[in-house]
Amino acid sequence: MQQDKRIAILSPVAWRTPPRGYGAWETVASNIAEGLVARGWDVTLFATADSVTQGTLRSVIARGYEEDGEQDPKVVEILHISEVMEHAAEFDLIHNNYDFIPLAFSRLIPTPILTTIHGFSSDKIRAVYRKYKHDAYFVSISDSDRDPELPYLATVYNGIDLSNLTFRPDPGDKLVFLGRIHPDKGVHLAIEAAKKAGRDLVIAGIIQDKRYFETLVRPHIDGRTAQYIGPVGPSARDLLFKEAYALLHLNELPERFGLVMAEAMAAGVPVIAMDRGSCREVVADGETGFLVNDTDEAAAAVERIPRIDRAACRRRVETHFSIDCMVTAYEKVYARIFADRARWRTLPTRTTRLDGYVSYANQEVDAPA
């Protein structure tokens, strides 16, 4: 593999990379960067100035805009993204983990952009991806979360840091919800299922929709059968999984990947998830948890949790969702991009995709070293 290539990892700047608590995209960007560095790659991480990396850190933003309310998110976003683009020529590849905005630079720089699409937050942003679908490269994080018009190079599942998650062969006695407190994540469904199953529920995560929390979640919080403990960082998350009998992941919308499902299984905690989106790609139904369609099925699945081998949960993550698995897959994607770029020695001013590769027509330049 061509570890002499220079890779820029563009991380979001809502939170620190890696995040202290919540921050799914920042978590993945960090795991990619650190996994590559461990394998000898020359990696520069573009992230907030308080970020932590074994590679080279470059930043123009002091702290994440979610951690510093004085900042304007849009201003921070543009300053951050433009920084990597203005230095694009220093790199052989920009690995974009910042959604669609960086694609607007793809026709203006000589460096290829690989975008990991962490999900489509709105159908409206698909127009940007489709406009630049022949000017950049794309990876999906699950087979289920794909746009039919985009020419993906691969699906690369997110990889998690197993060193932060202790495998526990013995179950706790509580059901756990961990994630954003938002209607999309179905916290109210987790509360309903836990009541039907007669099990105590612990809810952890940032409150992203305050009205939803106040109307559909808080009225059920009594500190005993249902308790809310707020956001949790890696250490607190690990202790929370020690208490867990099972994780409830009853998402209302199709899941894009679902880091928390992999994190729970890494700790040996079975997952009960709605059969929507990527859940059936992450959870092996009947082996590492159960896929359900409503709260009645979820409650019934709680009774079947003793059938799940907690060691099998850990093995599934080690086999499919570790940092090593993810980085190996990205190295294959990188190799394909570098081979493609070496084949065509021209500027990306106008492009045509042939057989899954990008060809370029215009002014001759030297191929990347």
Image (cartoon, rainbow, N blue to C red):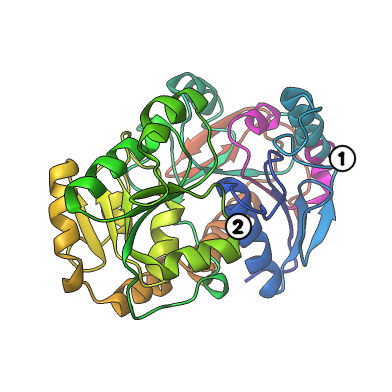
Q: Which residues are magenta?
A: 84-107
Residue assigned mark 2: 233
Mark 1 is surrounded, within 10 Å at the Cα level, by few (under 14), some (14 to 19) or many (20 or more) other residues, namely: some
**Mark in front: 1 vs 2:** 2
Q: Amino acid at mark 2?
A: Gly
**Residue 200: percent from left, percent from top:** 31, 55
**Picture layout, residue 18 above or below residue 60:** below
The secondary element bearing badge 1 is classed as: loop
User: Where does the N terminus fall, quadrant-wise?
Assistant: bottom right
Residue 275 lies left or right of residue 23; in this view the side is left
The quarter in which the C terminus is drawn is bottom right
Q: Which amino acid does the dot numbered 1 rest on?
A: Val
Q: Quadrant of residue 96?
A: top right
Q: In the depicted view, which residue is nearer to us: 328 or 218?
A: 218
Determine crowd level at label 2: few under 14, some 14-19, many 20+ residues with C-alpha closer than 10 A: few
* Displayed quadrant of residue 169: bottom left
Residue 235 position within the rendered picture, expressed as x and y whole percent measured from the top left: 59, 66
- Identified at 67% across, 41% down, the residue is 12
- Residue 159 lies in magenta, yes or no? no
* Residue 33 percent across, percent down from the top left: 67, 60
Whether residue 283 is visible: yes
Determine whether, in the image, residue 94 is placed left or right of residue 238.
right
* Rendering quarter of residue 185: top left
Q: Name which of mark 1 and mark 2 comes first in the sequence.
A: 1
Residue position marked by numbered label 1 in the rendering? 60
Does residue 120 appear left or right of residue 7 in this picture?
A: left
Name the secondary structure under disc 2. Answer: loop
